[in-house]
Amino acid sequence: EKYKQDDYLRTKAELDPDLSLPRVKTYDFIVVGGGTAGCLVAGRLSEHHNVLLLESGGTPVPTTANPFLNEFVATNPAINNIFESVPQFNFDQEGGGIVKSHTGRMLGGSGSHNGNFYNRGSPRDYDNYALLTGDPTWRYETVLNHFKSYENFIGDLIQEDSRNEFYATGGLLTVNTDMPPILPAWFQAAAELGYPTGDPNGNQTESFTPAAMSVENGERESTYTAFIKPFESTRTSLTVMRYSEVEQILINERKAAYGVIYKRHGIPQIAHALKEVIVSAGTISSPLLLMKSGIGPEAALNAAGIPVEINLPGVGKNLRDHSAVVLRFTAQNANPALLPRITDMEAAIAAYQEANRTGFLTRLDVGPQAFISSSRAKANGEANWPDHQIVFAQHGLIDDGTTNVALALQIILNRAESVGEIGFNSTNYLNGERDDKNLALIDFKLFTVLSDMEVMIEGIRLGLQIMENTTSFQQMNVAYTESTPEACQGIPYRSNQYWMCYVQQRGYSWLHIVGTCSMGLPGNPMTVVDSHYKVLGIAGLRVIDASVMPRTTNANLNGGVILVAEKGAQMILEEHNEAKKN
Ligand SMILES: Cc1cc2nc3c(=O)[nH]c(=O)nc-3n(C[C@H](O)[C@H](O)[C@H](O)COP(=O)(O)OP(=O)(O)OC[C@H]3O[C@@H](n4cnc5c(N)ncnc54)[C@H](O)[C@@H]3O)c2cc1C
């Protein structure tokens, strides 16, 4: 609230004396949304062009910097948009089936409140994008150069001999490895079950791996801290406007985008773009902004009374997500060397506050992890393209004087075949509603494809094996402690039917949503943008964020979104430099 008030006073002083008429200012590029993708794109383009970045939130609060405190910042409505889904019937039934998606509303976006897990995904994910778009530059061997250009990889590796091929230092965003004391036990469990060990990035294959994190010296690295914050006060070609909500993209009679209408602290403003408007408002708000501007499925636009600029039926469709369940355990004979806990909180905080931060609070609060190929993946000839992920977590981090330590495994289905959508609430729109939270009809539809449920149950069974059937964890006397959901009472315990019921009751969205402005082949009716992110049928307009990814990657998403943004920024710079030369 203080940040907002300070920014409001600055805005008022700047716009005084005339607050009644919108100002019109002109830039080369306008970037809508300063989240994971938008901050990188605005930062990179402003190295060469005059750029306006419009973000509906403000500067991230200091609490966002600590990797351990993400749960306190991820759900606070002052800095997040909290969207409610339409009722879901295949998961989250114990929670009422209304899923709350909390996406960051601040510079850095969801990358300023997320868990700091950093995974690129599988090379096969990008090879698949090349197939889906018909553009070979999406193949991993090519996008690897983009990963290397923005990453500053300073972490340890399990496969040290792969360092030169897959990693680079010198990029603006630091990536590190989290090596918790439990890692050797995790790897031993892998060996007992016949799985290899490896690294999560580089060349992800079926393996147990450490977690990688976007953390430097104990502080969160986001695209805001890496690409905007260090340059904002000195780079005159970069203008960042906070608390600035874009309401509409301006499109002329030649079907070219030439600017945006936005409200800065509620004060109407207009900005014009000489070159391009780039929408980076995230998987929920990007399709909504397109629809508010007349770009989307004709029927939905007609129902809302919005003049149709172009009929693109794919806008809001193809919602893809990671679906998850958690299994809880207790280590009844925990080895404190492997599962250390904080015995002195003040000492832990003091260690964190040293110039060279050390200790518990510099680490991730979850990890290590495993990437597994299900029997469905194997039957599809994709043994080398894992489709689920298992993430270990130690809870109860503060020592309570007992040897009992709470543990959990998250089982995540990363390459789900179930497809959802984001519809447009035309009734609310006709009633004058413009807030995305009241316009989005989010329908995840997770687990609507039966084989997704089967893969999830396979993952659950593997999770139980890791904890219950390996000497590694049995030495700690690990026991499964999750209660039976009420709706599943009476179903034979641990049968497939039981786990199906369990998933329906307690399954949840991992909030790694993509695909609602999907890249694709031009002839595909679901395609919204081409492989260069250009909106079909409208000149001067691109979408660059998670919404253009046609499928989720096989891992936490942020690394993939940063890649999408870096590739986009390089493409735009090349195209406009070429244009200048010509
Ligand atoms: C709770 C949560 C935890 C996650 N944890 C992880 C993790 O540990 N590791 C990982 O890799 N990934 C994680 N993710 C996923 C990852 O953070 C997101 O996929 C990624 O940040 C999406 O980037 P984006 O640029 O598409 O959107 P966002 O980062 O969400 O950015 C969109 C931005 O646009 C702004 N905006 C929206 N509408 C407008 C408008 N009309 N005008 C102006 N501004 C607007 C928003 O305020 C926001 O800042 C998590 C996501 C969530 C929600």
Image: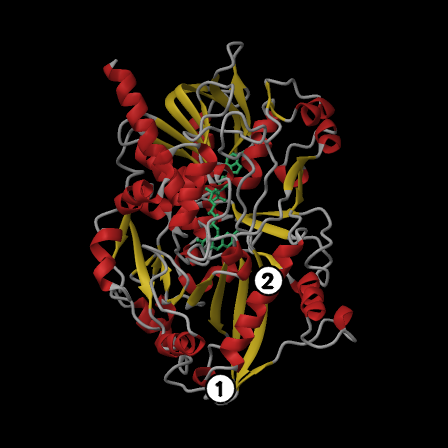
For disc 2, the marked residue is 456
Question: Is residue 34 visible in this depiction of the protein?
Answer: no
**Position above or below: 214 against 572:** below
Tell me, for residue 163, which label it has, or none.
none
Q: Earlier in the sequence, mark 1 or mark 2?
A: 2
Q: Residue placed at 40% from the left, 65% from the top?
A: 207
Category of crowding for the residue at label 2, using alpha-carbon neighbours closer than 10 angstroms: few (below 14), some (14–19), many (at least 20): many
Q: How is the image coloured?
A: secondary structure
Find residue 418 and report its horizontal and vertical position in percent: 62, 48
Task: Give the SS element for disc 2.
Answer: helix
- SS for dot 1: helix
Dot 1 crowding, Cα within 10 Å, few <14, some 14–19, many 20+: some
| Left/right of residue 40 with respect to residue 504 in the rendered view | left
Cα distance in 3D space between marks 1 and 2:
24 Å
- The quadrant of the image that shows the C terminus is top left
Residue 214 percent across, percent down from the top left: 35, 56
Depth check: 174 or 490 in front?
490
Q: Residue furthest top?
A: 253
Residue at image location 43% in from the left, 49% down from the top = 558
| Any part of residue 529 in sight | yes
Position above or below: 18 against 451 = above
- Residue type, mark 2 in image: Met
Question: At x 44% / y 40%, what residue is drawn?
Answer: 129
Answer above or below: position of 382 versus 535: below
Query: Is 39 placed above or below 506 here?
Result: above
Please give left or right for residue 181 compared with residue 162 in the image.
right
Q: Which residue is mark 1?
A: 474
Circle 1: residue type: Gln
Q: How far across and how far down the image is residue 228, in percent?
A: 34, 41
